[in-house]
Amino acid sequence: MAINKKYGINPRLISLITGKDLSEIPDSPTASMLPGHYGRIVARKMDKFSREFPKNVHSLTCTSCNHKGNYDLGLVVIDNKKLKNLSQDKSIDGEIESPSIMDCIQATGYFRCRQCNAAGYWKFSAKTEMAFYIGSISAAIFDNKDASKQLFTYGVLNLADGSRHRWATDAEEHYLNKLAGQPEDSFTWNRLANSYLKGGRPDLAAVAFEQSLKIDPAQMESLYSLGKILHEAGEDEAAARYLRQVLINAKRYGRMKAEDMRDMLTSTMEYLLIIYDDFEKFLSALPKAQDMLLPGETLSDSCAIGFMDLTIYPDDYKSFYPLAEMYMGKRRDELADRTFCKSISKADKNLLFPEGRREKKSGKKKKKKGKK
């Protein structure tokens, strides 16, 4: 119960995945009720996770039950255009409504009322409003580009479909409404999971990523993100399984730009190298050409690529680019700056991943080298 009281869970999420009617689910579900395998594991290890944004705790009052509490709003984004218009009173149905900075903000943090589990209906105290005004001034004076240190910033938050929502729970409802009509849309499950992750809820993100992969096991972005979450949770064996699948499925994935795909593959291999903590083990764990074949596909049908004298510097992510491009298949042709690679003959395809070796360079920086 303590986990739920601190973080909150939307009963609709459980209902959509399990098929249970909302009447069968408590108004305030606990983490033990999360569907799938990994959400409950991650919920027990929430303190292990790094934060995209620093804690930004403020006092809010739930207008559904009038309970007052302190909640982590994450990054507060201020619409500068609306803020400039605050001095003008708004007339609604002939009555004058006092302007509030609340009308100008969006927040990334995901939170629900600890008393009634409602979300999206909040009232600010005068003290909280003053803190927001001070935050808006600070954001205007100190333009901090480091997201890990930002509490307030100027701009707007739009979802991929262009919609705009004040609270993370509003964005959640938007996605859940979509999924109610299209529950087999793995990409929308992925986007819902991303919103949970941005809101500081890796437990809910794991649930949604897992559901995305249940629908489409080749959903590359969900494979990567779930693998990353599991690594942070200390579940490295499971993390490595999902991260290997990222490499296996990349060449058939078409829902991201080639440059973004290469960066994701590079990050995937960096995580795998951390997990195995040994270059030879890392190399041997990488998917081989035959691992990437679809049923009925042969090596002659697939695009096998080999590299000569591949050198990887763990501290230089671009040194992973040639290896990342190999897993992109024909999609590497979309890259304007692809690194040198050469097609290998059918006779050489079994030599796609020979053993690697370590070397030192100038006695200063280690390089990890393998023949491909």
Image (cartoon, rainbow, N blue to C red):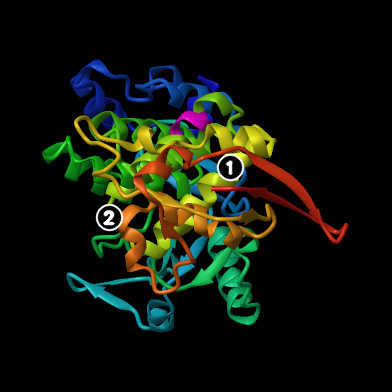
Toward the viewer: 90 or 276?
276
Task: Specify whether residue 107 is in view.
Answer: no
Principal SS element in the magenta part? helix
Q: Which mark is residue 255?
A: 2
Please give left or right for residue 162 compared with residue 122 in the image.
left
Element under disc 1 = helix
Dot 1 or dot 2: first in sequence order is 2
Please provide percent x and percent y for residue 197.
46, 45
The verdict on residue 241 being magenta is: yes
Q: Residue at x 86, y 59 (%)?
A: 364
Please provide percent x and percent y for residue 7.
49, 34
Disc 1 to disc 2, how far (Cα)?
Answer: 22 Å
Contact (CB < 8 A) between labels 1 and 2? no
Q: Determine the image quadrant of residue 183.
A: top left
Residue bearing the label numbered 1:
271
Which residues are drawn in magenta? 239-243
